[in-house]
Amino acid sequence: PDAVAPAPATGTARAKTTVGVVKRESTSLTTVFAGSTFSYTIQPYCEGQSSSWGVLRLGNPKLVDTLPAGLTYVSSSPQGTWDPVARTVTWDLADPAQTVQSAYTACIGPITGSTPPMANTDITITVAAPAAGTGYNGIGIVNPATISGLPLGAQAPISATSSWRVVVSDTPPV
């Protein structure tokens, strides 16, 4: 008897890159005393991981934290690149020299299957509030962070921004 070939299997592969960033104070601060130092965290992430969607690589991924006037950069961990003119701290997420890179392999590097995409990667920023008597008493300072990059095969970059607001007080807490 003649063998009958089975019908070919068909399927649809879907992939996307959706990035996001969460910015939050490290110690539940909403008001800081003038001249004090305080820290906050930034957690970038990559969405799209599910049983029906894959994740596309993100080209030229950058995370930028913009410090508004009044805040003074002290440090960051992992270390970013501070630009005092632009008042930004930048992490080149594709640069193997920057230690934050290893957590981003699912979106920007070879997919190994062993590293969650941008999961639990907190970046801690420490800044100093403006000094007392400098006109910031009672003023809210908004501090944004943005992750951006170009998804593989896309024509336009994508980005996501998150902000955090803190109020400066010249009066120390009681």
Image (cartoon, rainbow, N blue to C red):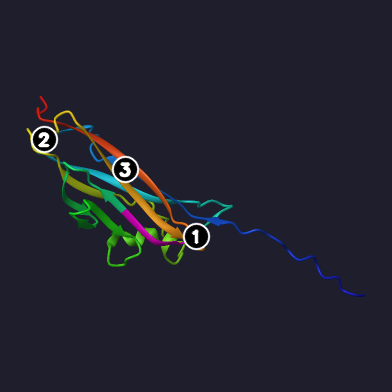
* Front one among 112 and 127: 127
Q: Marks 1/2: CA distance?
A: 45 Å
Q: Vertically, is 141 above or below 156?
A: above
Q: Which residue is mark 2?
A: 34
Question: Was residue 154 drawn as part of the magenta stretch in this picture?
Answer: no
Q: What amino acid is labelled 2 in the image?
A: Ala
Percent from the top left, x then y, of residue 111?
46, 64
> Residues under labels 3 and 2: Cα distance?
22 Å
- Residue in the foreground of this view, choosing between 7 and 152: 152
Disc 1 vs disc 3: which is toward the camera? 1
User: From the viewer's perspective, is residue 75 above or below residue 111?
Assistant: above
**Label 1 vs label 2, nearer the camera:** 1
Kindly identify the amino acid type of the residue bearing the numbered disc 1: Gln
Nearer to us: label 3 or label 2 = 2
Residue 23: which numbered mark, if any?
3
Mark 3 / mark 2, whichever is N-terminal: 3
Give x and y (percent) for residue 58.
44, 60
Position in image of residue 151 (x %, y %): 47, 59
Work out whether residue 172 or residue 118 is closer to the camera in this orientation and state it: 172
| Crowd band around label 2 with a 10 angstrom C-alpha radius: few (<14), some (14–19), many (20+) | many
* Amino acid beneath label 3: Lys
Task: Give the distance between the C-alpha atoms of the residues marked 1 and 3, in whole angstroms.
Answer: 28 Å
Q: Which residues are magenta?
A: 56-63
Looking at the image, the residue that sits furthest to the bottom is: 2
Q: Residues within 10 Å of mark 1 (few under 14, many from 20)?
A: few
